Amino acid sequence: MSAHPPSRLEMLRFLERVQVQDLQRTRDWIATEEQLLAAQADRRPAPPPPDWLLEHGIGTGRPPVRVHTGQCWDTRTRCKPTTADAARRALAEGVSACPQCRPDTALGMLE
C-alpha cells in the first residue's frame, strides 16, 4: 500500500479508465446485437413477388410500355409493382400485355 493517499487527479484518471472499459464493453454488446439482427434478417424468407408489374420505357417521363403478371419470366429491370386495378387501367389505355404471361387473360380483359 502506498504511503500517501491518491490525489484527486489520480482518482479521476482511474475513473476515466473504468469508464472507457465500460464504454468498450457496451460497444461490444451493441456490435454483437447488430450481428444477431443481421443474421436473423438473412434467414427471413424473401417477400412474395407482386401480383402485377408495370414495365416502363426508357427516357424522360418513362411511360408504361407493358403489363406483366408477377410470375412472368420475361420481366426487365424497369418493372415496378402495381395493383390489379392499375394493370387493368393501363391495358384499357392501350399499354401492351406481355405476350409471354398474358396478363390481359389473367385479368379477364379478353372478349
Image (cartoon, grey):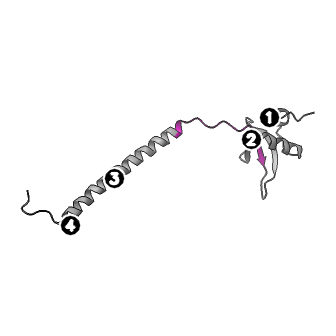
Disc 4: which residue: 9
Mark 4 secondary-structure assignment: helix
Disc 3: which residue: 24
Q: Which is closer to the viewer, label 3 or label 1?
A: 3
Report the residue at 90% width, 34% height from top.
110
Screen quadrant of the C terminus = top right
- In three-dimensional space, the C-alpha distance between marks 3 and 1, rounded to whole angstroms, equals 56 Å
Mark toward the start of the polypeptide (3 vs 2): 3
Q: Splitting the image into 4 quarters, where does residue 87 fall?
A: top right
Mark toward the start of the polypeptide (3 vs 1): 3
Disc 2: which residue: 75
Residue interval drawn in magenta: 41-56
Mark 3 secondary-structure assignment: helix
Q: Which is closer to the viewer, label 4 or label 1?
A: 4
Q: Which is closer to the viewer, label 3 or label 2?
A: 3
Mark toward the start of the polypeptide (2 vs 1): 2
Report the residue at 79% width, 34% height from top.
101
Screen quadrant of the N terminus = bottom left
Mark 2 secondary-structure assignment: loop
Q: Dots 3 and 2: beta carbons under 8 Å? A: no
Disc 1: which residue: 101
Q: For the residue marked with disc 4, what is the amino acid? A: Leu
- In three-dimensional space, the C-alpha distance between marks 4 and 1, rounded to whole angstroms, equals 77 Å
Residue 107: where, in percent of width, then height?
A: 83, 35
